[in-house]
Image (cartoon, rainbow, N blue to C red):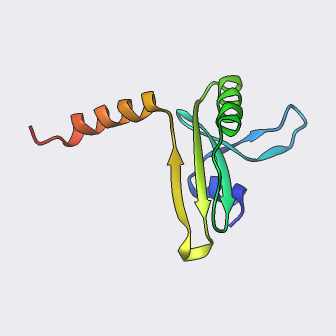
Amino acid sequence: MSEIQELKRMRAKPQKNSGRGLYQKADGKLEPFLVDVKEYQKSFSLSRDVWSKICSDAVRSGGVPSLMIALGSGKETIRLWVIDDTMFHEMREAWLEKYDPQ
């Protein structure tokens, strides 16, 4: 599956590329997130530079930075999400409000 197909799969709206009318291959808006998709067969290396680029793209687009990594292909694809610590805690808090049995 290509990165643009991953965006379609999650129903994200592809982002246009710098006003050229083309769509960036791997960026999409999935409220509230700006999702950057990276697709690899076996591994992906996350660095400060990669995360910095994702964050700067998100700021320009008015979205929350997120990274979706697809490893493998077909039924063997493992999909992982990377979000920052603040968003993780906000999502956990919302989950607890909805599902916590207390």
The quarter of the image holding the C terminus is: top left
Q: Residue at x 79, y 38 (%)?
A: 16
Q: Residue furthest left?
A: 102
Residue occupying the point 61% across, 46% down: 12
Q: Position of residue 48 (x, y in %)?
A: 65, 35
Could you say which quadrant of the image residue 30 lies in?
top right
Q: Position of residue 65 (x, y in %)?
A: 59, 33
Residue 23 placement, left or right of 73: right
Residue in the foreground of this view, choosing between 30 and 26:
26
Q: Residue at x 54, y 74 (%)?
A: 76
- Count of picture labels: 0
Which quarter of the figure has residue 47?
Answer: top right
Q: Position of residue 100 (x, y in %)?
A: 17, 40
Q: Is residue 87 above or below residue 47?
A: above
Pick the residue in front: 92 or 85. 85
Does 35 sit left or right of 94 as displayed? Answer: right
Residue 20 occupies quadrant = top right
Q: Residue furthest bottom?
A: 75
Q: Residue at x 51, y 48 (%)?
A: 81
Is 28 placed left or right of 21 in the picture? Answer: left
Quadrant (top left, top right, bottom left, bottom right) of the N terminus? bottom right
- Nearest the viewer among 102 and 82 is 82
- Find residue 94 and report its horizontal and vertical position in percent: 30, 34
